[in-house]
Image (cartoon, rainbow, N blue to C red):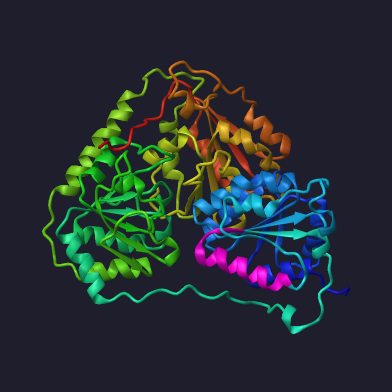
């Protein structure tokens, strides 16, 4: 075998810390890394059709697994086009390492082809954006940036000039990579009984609401038991759907969806409380603040690690540790409480709100269209514990927050803080690769699908049995709904099923007369590649939008 290079070291290091997939798109500066990938069999190269899709896939992989997501991007336009996906990972606290190729060191700064100052580019959105300028640096930089991404739950960037990647590395202990290694574990503070008692006192002397975010994965059952002991309602952030069994009587909906609070009933539940007990919530604004950003409720913040600390709002106490254990410890110190009619009353109010939404829908049954709500209600019985759910940004997401009922703690992945359209298809590819024993279902709008539809080719190439549900209403509705005179938001869409079949996928159209159960059964049992469902919806069907709490 020829002498190992810096590129070989990079790939060996990533394999040693458990990276299974690298998402990217080739370019000349990446040739040494592609050669290194070809020489090994532990890390799979996943050829996406666009650099931003590669970055979004790495972000989704990190969100789903908690492990380091990695994307590989070429110089110039390759690095530029991935900025959105890297920002998504950073804002949603997903550990991602973006590796970018650079022109040779001697060609930098001289107006050379595709020479861009990448460290400044990524440094404007990331705390860690560095360039490896010599072979000896690679050991420290790979460890530093990978550790930073994992421990701080953030994205990081490393630029690698092509001539550095090609440099041979000596056979020295400094460059030795063990078969398997663990980067330094996160330090979790010890929580005293006094801390728990402080929490219990605050909860029992105020009116609590429990709020659940994406970092509470695995703690749902314990949080439900705590809600029962407190006789308190549970509300989830949009990225926290699926953690709580949504058939649980204390679960009362989602708040905070891409700048909208969703239904008034759920908003009223939070407004009625005087203290928020949060578990693994990254963005507390929808639950604590008014439209003027004034904190209106007290806070007890529970987070699994220091990366989830809240710095923006005043908290009575912050507890850091395993969220199931924390929930159980709080439950264990609560005195038995007589059940009131609070939950029943709140549930009734929420039901009245949702019934009002149902009653407001048009009664005419146009054979050319179904409606999003009816479709989701028909989808619900088909969902089980073997499914992962990925949801895009758009008006469909509000319907999903209201009427997609996750009763089996399915994993649920979204672009939460950035809310980027086009997230779900690259995300579905990554989630399916990360968790092949489950089927991944992506729900997107026609606008989002139109941005990344070519990634169907990626799913076909890797024979991924994902289901892509396109809510096709022919309009960018979230924008149109804010306009006095609709303008610039109509979409001229192709036949999405024909489009999918052109790549070698399968699919079906759903309209008003379709046997939806039969089509869903066909889609969810399809195993040989992706299946696209073109769900045709009237553009006049508006999703329910509400304003934030005022005052």
Magenta highlight: main SS = helix
Q: Assess whether residue 155 is covered by the magenta stretch.
A: yes
- Residue sitting at x 86%, y 74%: 3
Of residue 415 and residue 315, the one placed in the foreground of this image is: 315
Residue at 25% across / 50% down in the picture?
Answer: 249
Q: Residue furthest front?
A: 110
Q: In this image, 158 relative to 302: left or right? A: right
136 is within the stretch colored magenta = no
For image coordinates 61% across by 41% down, the residue present is 531
- 95 up-or-down from 519: above or below: below
Task: Evaluate whether residue 429 shows in this view.
Answer: no
Give x and y (percent) for residue 195.
Answer: 25, 71
* Residue 291 visible, this orientation: yes
Q: Position of residue 360 (x, y in %)?
A: 32, 24
| Total tally of numbered discs in the picture | 0
Instruction: Please provide percent x and percent y for residue 446.
Output: 56, 31
Question: For the view shown, which residue lies furthest in the top direction?
Answer: 485
Quarter holding residue 35: bottom right
Asked whether 539 or 502 is in front, the reply is 539
Q: Quadrant location of the C terminus?
A: top left
Indicate left or right for 240 with 551 as reference.
right
Say which quarter of the image contains residue 496: top right
Bounds of the magenta segment: 137-156
Q: Look at the picture and state if 186 lies above or below 79.
A: below
Locate the N terminus and report the quarter of the image it occupies.
bottom right
- In this rendering, would 137 be left or right of 442? right
Q: Position of residue 438 (x, y in %)?
A: 54, 55
Q: In the figure, residue 286 lies in which quadrant?
A: top left
Task: Determine whether 248 is above or below 291 in the image.
Answer: below
């Amino acid at each position: 075998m020829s002498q190992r290079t810096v590129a070989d070291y990079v790939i060996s290091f990533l394999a040693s810390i458990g990276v299974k997939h690298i998402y990217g798109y080739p370019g000349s500066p990446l040739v040494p890394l592609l050669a290194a990938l070809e020489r090994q069999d532990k890390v799979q190269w996943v050829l996406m059709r666009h650099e931003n899709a590669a970055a979004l896939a790495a972000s989704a992989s990190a969100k789903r697994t908690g492990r380091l997501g990695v994307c590989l991007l070429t110089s110039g336009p390759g690095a530029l086009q991935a900025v959105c996906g890297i920002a998504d990972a950073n804002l949603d606290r997903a550990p991602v390492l973006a590796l970018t190729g650079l022109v040779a060191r001697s060609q930098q700064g001289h107006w050379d082809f595709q020479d861009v100052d990448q460290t400044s580019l990524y440094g404007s959105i990331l705390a860690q954006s560095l360039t490896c300028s010599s072979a000896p640096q690679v050991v420290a930089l790979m460890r530093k940036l990978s550790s930073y991404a994992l421990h701080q739950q953030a994205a990081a960037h490393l630029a690698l000039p092509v001539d550095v990647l090609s440099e041979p590395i000596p056979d020295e202990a400094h460059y030795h990579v063990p078969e398997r290694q663990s980067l330094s574990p996160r330090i979790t503070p010890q929580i005293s009984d006094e801390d728990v008692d402080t929490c219990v006192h605050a909860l029992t002397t105020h009116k609590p609401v429990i709020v659940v975010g994406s970092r509470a994965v695995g703690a749902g059952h314990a949080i439900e038991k705590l809600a029962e002991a407190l006789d308190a309602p549970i509300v989830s952030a949009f990225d926290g759907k699926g953690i709580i069994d949504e058939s649980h009587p204390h679960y009362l909906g989602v708040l905070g969806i891409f700048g909208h609070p969703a239904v008034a009933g759920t908003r009223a539940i939070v407004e009625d409380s005087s203290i928020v007990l949060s578990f693994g919530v990254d963005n507390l604004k929808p639950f604590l603040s008014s439209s003027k950003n004034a904190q209106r409720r007290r806070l007890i913040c529970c987070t699994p690690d220091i990366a989830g600390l809240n710095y923006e709002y005043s908290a009575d106490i912050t507890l850091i540790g395993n969220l199931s254990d924390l929930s159980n410890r709080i439950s264990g110190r609560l005195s038995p409480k007589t059940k009131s009619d609070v939950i029943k009353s709140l549930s009734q109010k929420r039901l009245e709100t949702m019934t009002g939404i149902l009653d407001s829908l048009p009664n005419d049954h146009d054979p050319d269209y179904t409606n999003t709500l009816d479709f989701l209600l028909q989808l619900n019985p088909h969902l089980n514990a073997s499914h992962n759910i990925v949801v895009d940004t758009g008006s469909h997401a509000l319907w999903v927050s209201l009427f997609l009922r996750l009763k089996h703690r399915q994993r649920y992945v979204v672009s939460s803080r950035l809310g980027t359209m086009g997230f779900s298809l690259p995300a579905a590819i990554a989630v399916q690769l990360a968790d092949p024993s489950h089927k991944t279902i992506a729900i997107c709008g026609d606008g989002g699908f139109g941005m990344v539809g070519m990634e169907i080719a990626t799913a076909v190439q890797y024979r991924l049995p994902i289901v892509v549900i396109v809510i096709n209403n022919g309009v960018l509705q979230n924008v149109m709904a804010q306009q006095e005179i609709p303008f610039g938001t109509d979409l001229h869409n192709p036949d999405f099923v024909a489009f999918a079949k052109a790549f070698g996928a399968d699919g079906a159209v759903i309209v008003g007369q379709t046997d939806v159960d039969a089509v869903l059964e066909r889609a969810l049992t399809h195993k040989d590649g992706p299946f696209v469902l073109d769900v045709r919806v009237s553009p006049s069907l508006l999703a329910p939008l509400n304003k934030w709490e005022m005052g």
